[in-house]
Image: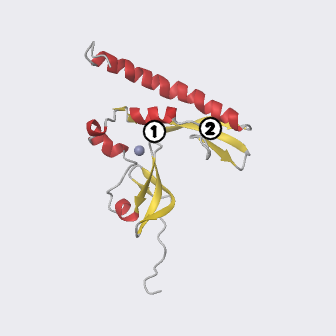
Amino acid sequence: MAHTTARLDLTGQRFGKLTVVARAENVGPRTAWLCRCDCGGERVVKTVHLRAGKVKSCGCVRALHSDSALGLHYVDGTCVEMLRANTRRSNNKSGVVGVVWQPESRRWQATIMFKGTRHNLGKYERFDDAVQARREAEALYYESFLADYDAKQAMTEPAGAGS
Ligand SMILES: [Zn+2]
């Protein structure tokens, strides 16, 4: 084949807040990559967009600059809406957010991302225990954060607006 060059592999490379996790299915004729964002979000991005620096986050960074348009709010760099979505997401068949199987230790590792830091919640023999640890951490980190946020919003919004 005439134009076969060494296959590009961006796995592990960083572009802004995105780290390339794996090759994704092509987007049309374009090579695309599954990227994980520092905020915990994921996004499939075309090679050209990564290399040109057009896409540097899962969407949270651009949102930062036009957050009113998207209705996103940030506190200390943490997206309020993203946290809400995270707390709502429940068990699915492929697994629970923040709970991963560690083959070396044969344990379920629970973690939580909060304000750009990954907190280790321990390793568990039982999947349910790891999920439980994750849920408790969500309550601790996310819900208190959201409660704070809502309290502040309530103070800054005109009284009697009622929804
Ligand atoms: Zn992001």
Q: Distance between the residues labelled 1 and 2?
A: 16 Å
Residue that mark 1 sits on: 116
Counting from the top left corner in percent of width and height, residue 65 is at 27, 41
Q: Which of marks 1 and 2 is in front?
A: 2
> Looking at numbered disc 1 in the image, what kind of residue is underneath it?
Gly
Q: How crowded is mark 1: few (under 14 residues within 10 Å), some or many (20 or more)?
A: some
Q: In this view, does 37 lie above or below 122?
A: below
**Secondary structure state at the residue bearing disc 2:** strand
Query: 150 left or right of 125?
Result: left
Upstream in the sequence, badge 1 or badge 2?
A: 2
Counting from the top left corner in percent of width and height, residue 38 is at 45, 45
**Secondary structure state at the residue bearing disc 1:** loop
Q: Is residue 79 visible?
A: no
Q: Nearer the viewer, residue 142 or 77?
A: 142
Specify the quadrant that holds the C terminus: top left
Q: Nearer the viewer, residue 162 or 114?
A: 162
Q: Is residue 59 above or below residue 139?
A: below
Counting from the top left corner in percent of width and height, residue 58 is at 40, 48
Report how many numbered discs are placed on residues in the image. 2
Residue that mark 2 sits on: 110
Asked whether the residues under the numbered discs 1 and 2 touch, taking CB atoms below 8 Å apart as contact, a structural biologist would say no
Q: Is mark 1 within 8 Å of ligand 1?
A: no
